[in-house]
Image (cartoon, grey):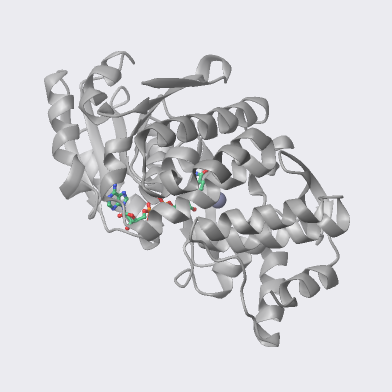
Amino acid sequence: MRMVKVPLGNRSYNILIGRGLLARLGAECSKLQLGRRCAIISDRNVAPRFAKAAQRSLVQAGFDSFLITVPAGETAKSIKSVQACYDQLANCRLERKSFIVALGGGVVGDLAGFVAATYLRGIAFVQVPTTLLAQVDSSVGGKVGVNLKAGKNLVGAFYQPRVVLCDFATLKTLPDREYRAGLAEVIKYGIIYDASLFRLLEREMPKLLKRDEKILAAVVARCCEIKADVVGQDETESGLRAILNFGHTIGHALEAISGYGKYLHGEAISIGQVAAASLSSRLSGLPADDVERIAKLFHRAGLPIQVKLNPVQLNQLCAAMKLDKKVSAGEIKFVLAQKIGKVEFGQKVPESLVRETLNRKP
Ligand SMILES: NC(=O)c1ccc[n+]([C@@H]2O[C@H](COP(=O)([O-])OP(=O)(O)OC[C@H]3O[C@@H](n4cnc5c(N)ncnc54)[C@H](O)[C@@H]3O)[C@@H](O)[C@H]2O)c1
Ligand SMILES: [Zn+2]
């Protein structure tokens, strides 16, 4: 088992990475000095597979656990689900010392974390991420929240979990498309922070696609280390944390204009990162060779690297980029790369250049 610490003073916590961690959930929760009662929040795909094992482990450690199941998919990240969770927590008489276990992908983690942050003005929560994306990204760092009709993640909080358990065994049942989408965030860490991780991914992509546990362990741990390092320096995104948004300005806009259905998040940011790499070669000195390596690696991971937009869609995409909550004073800011492993945030990019980049033929 590997362990990564997220250094946040008295809110520091560990990320445990390994196989069989679900069976250790109860033992790990025992170390946190919490109350006896807890609720597992999960979704309809994950609960039938893993909730029993989670409950067994909690019961063995002396906890009383209740299971709350929400629908699967992005629509569960809503105020309506939050309300349903609050009602069930109250019915199960969860109190200040009680805690919540988020068992699922990023949707469940963001929802359950937000419920934990606000129920009784905040009770403890534990993350048990079951998608690759959630293991390397969403379960770490404390951003929790839900969507509004007006946009994604518009209601939320910074609220850190008490421990994160990444059990590879849970990834076995993840559909291939979801797994590949997680790889888009993995590759991102190489581009923004670690050229040797990027090279490892170039070497080991075939094994990684086969979910080889040895490689997966090393890769998940390294991604968590990078995220922990960034979040440890800038928890609330006043600066550095913005680098985690590499490829996300275009990616988020693409998700928004295609109605959050056509592309998975990882697919949209794969296209977004390849476009950001092109922009970087024009604006921040990223060598053309590196642009090519980046596009190639996403392609080898089975991810889309280009999008064909008609003029109407291109206008919609630019409008959506300006609506993104990362825009300040109407200016579109990008994270751009200088080389693989090094990026800078807050870079102004003229809209005309974004249009030109997205219009380019392969
Ligand atoms: N908080 C953050 O910092 C942060 C960062 C990145 C993304 N996010 C959020 O994360 C969400 C996306 O997360 P996601 O990609 O994990 O999606 P998800 O939670 O919707 O999971 C994807 C699908 O896989 C299913 N699933 C999950 N685990 C499974 C397993 N082990 N076996 C079989 N099926 C399984 C789910 O039921 C769902 O249908 C988005 O809402 C995004 O905004 C948050
Ligand atoms: Zn992302």
Residue 294, percent from left and from top? 66, 53
Residue 147, percent from left and from top? 48, 58
**Residue at horizontal 64 percent and vertical 61 percent from the top:** 272
Residue 110 in view of the camera: no
Q: How many marks?
A: 0
**Residue at horizontal 60 percent and vertical 65 percent from the top:** 305
**Residue 238 found in image quarter:** top right
Q: Which sits in the foreground, 163 or 356?
A: 356
**Residue at horizontal 77 percent and vertical 74 percent from the top:** 355
Q: Quadrant of the C terminus?
A: bottom right
Judged left or right of residue 165, residue 343 is right
Residue 226, above or below 1: below
Residue 236, above or below 324: above
**Residue at horizontal 67 percent and vertical 50 percent from the top:** 246
Judged left or right of residue 104, residue 232 is right
**Residue 72 found in image quarter:** bottom left
Residue 230 in view of the camera: yes
Judged left or right of residue 55, residue 260 is right
Residue 280, percent from left and from top? 80, 55
Residue 356, percent from left and from top? 80, 74
Q: Quadrant of the N terminus?
A: top left
